Image (spheres, grey):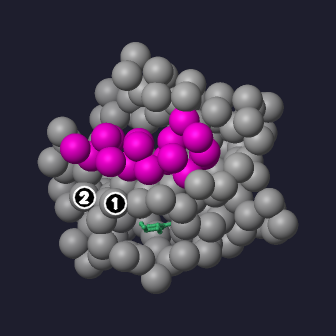
Amino acid sequence: AELKAFASTAPSLTAVQEFLVELIPARLSYYNWTGFYMLDPEDAETLVLGPFRGAPTEHVRIPVSQGICGAAVAQDQTVIIDDVNSDPRYLACSLETRSEIVVPVHAHGKVIGEIDIDSHDLAAFTAADRAFLEECAKIVGSYVERTGISSKA
Ligand code: SME
């Protein structure tokens, strides 16, 4: 409810995303990296890093054909990887990362980006995380449906 109230008055998409990356990991100690990747409006084959919390990553742009991040958008579904080191698609950001969940964000029925969470724990993400993050993704998607993707902070 707090989230939806904030999103209804937020000044920009970036503000909604900043609010979520602050709030999502705050009470969940196993959320070690939380961030948004959004499809580049000028190049739908590439994800661009948006607001995040956690260690800086060299993966600022990720082709849809690469990584767990690319797979979630290419397949247009939530991807949960219990052990990133056993998945050949995985692009390493932090050597400490052991598991990952990536949840697509939709607007007007199309995938526009994703929420990506890394954990230092093996198999950290459950159906409850998935349900929670899919709700967060819906808030972002609804915001974009109301205001458009181009609004800047
Ligand atoms: N691990 C991701 C890359 C992004 S970092 O986790 C922040 C992937 O395999 O696509």
Write down the quadrant of residue 34 in the picture. bottom left
Q: Quadrant of the N terminus?
A: top left
Residue 110 vertical position relative to residue 3 in the rendered view, above or below? below
Write down the quadrant of residue 74 in the picture. bottom right
Q: Quadrant of the C terminus?
A: bottom right
- Name the residue at 32% across, 27% down: 128
Q: Is residue 23 magenta?
A: yes
Image location (x, y in percent) of residue 125: 30, 42
- Name the residue at 41% across, 77% down: 57
Residue 139 vertical position relative to residue 11 in the rendered view, above or below? above
Of the pair 83 and 29, the residue shown nearer to us: 29
- Looking at the picture, which amino acid does disc 2 mark? Asn
Q: Which residues are magenta?
A: 10-26
Secondary structure of the residue carrying numbered label 2: loop
The residue under label 2 is 32
Image location (x, y in percent) of residue 59: 51, 77
- Name the residue at 30% across, 72% down: 55
- Looking at the picture, which amino acid does disc 1 mark? Arg
* Residue closest to the far right: 42
Q: Residues within 10 Å of mark 1 (few under 14, many from 20)?
A: some
Q: Is ligand 1 within 8 Å of the beta carbon of the residue shown at mark 1?
A: no
Is 29 left or right of 117, judged from the image as shown?
Answer: left
Find residue 53 and name its label: 1
- Name the residue at 32% across, 41% down: 24
